[in-house]
């Protein structure tokens, strides 16, 4: 079963750009829904439960047809969710660097 990873930073780390409450809601509720949907999609299929997201994505044709479409959507949503934190963090850091370097 997949779990929602902790963020690499506090919910209030980007207070200038996004509020603590919105970040917490987005991570703990919105992102959790995607992980829950992915787990529901693979529930009862021991072979899929033992695979990583990456291995399933790299061989979608090996998935049972009855779960493939649901799985593709769930994995895409979950992968996007897991990438959100690091991408958002990188954009904020880049923005701060650009602002610092401006004359």
Image (cartoon, grey):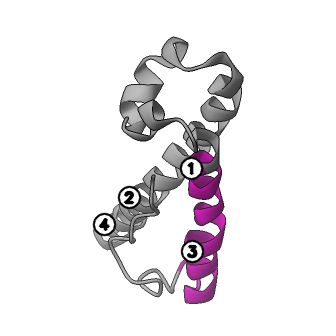
Q: At numbered mark 2, what does the secondary structure look like: helix, strand or loop?
A: helix
13 and 73: which one is in front? Answer: 73
Q: Earlier in the sequence, mark 2 or mark 1?
A: 1
Pointers 4 and 3 in contact (C-beta within 8 Å): no
- Looking at the image, can residue 18 be seen? no
Q: CA distance from mark 1 to mark 3?
A: 16 Å
Q: Which residues are magenta?
A: 17-39
Indicate the position of residue 95 as horizontal and vertical percent values: 41, 65
Q: At numbered mark 3, what does the secondary structure look like: helix, strand or loop?
A: helix
The label number, if any, that marks residue 86 in the structure image: 2
Q: Which residue bears the numbered disc 4?
A: 97
Q: Residue at x 46, y 26 (%)?
A: 57
101 and 97: which one is in front? Answer: 97
Q: CA distance from mark 4 to mark 3?
A: 29 Å
Indicate the position of residue 84 as horizontal and vertical percent values: 49, 56
The label number, if any, that marks residue 28 in the structure image: 3
**Is 73 positioned to the left or the right of 63 in the image?**
right
Pointers 2 and 1 in contact (C-beta within 8 Å): no
102 and 84: which one is in front? Answer: 84
Q: CA distance from mark 2 to mark 1?
A: 22 Å
Q: Earlier in the sequence, mark 4 or mark 3?
A: 3
Reply above or below: 28 against 66: below
Reply above or below: 53 against 97: above
The label number, if any, that marks residue 39 in the structure image: 1
Q: Earlier in the sequence, mark 1 or mark 3?
A: 3
């Amino acid at each position: 079963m997949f779990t929602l990873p902790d963020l690499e930073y506090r919910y209030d780390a980007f207070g200038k750009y996004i509020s603590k409450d919105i970040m917490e809601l987005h991570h703990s509720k919105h992102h959790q829904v995607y992980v829950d949907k992915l787990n529901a999609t693979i529930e009862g299929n021991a072979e899929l439960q033992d695979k990583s997201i990456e291995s399933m994505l790299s061989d979608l044709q090996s998935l049972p047809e009855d779960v493939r479409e649901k799985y593709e959507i769930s994995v895409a949503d979950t992968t996007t969710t897991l990438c959100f934190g690091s991408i958002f963090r990188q954009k904020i850091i880049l923005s701060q660097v650009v602002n610092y370097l401006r004359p």
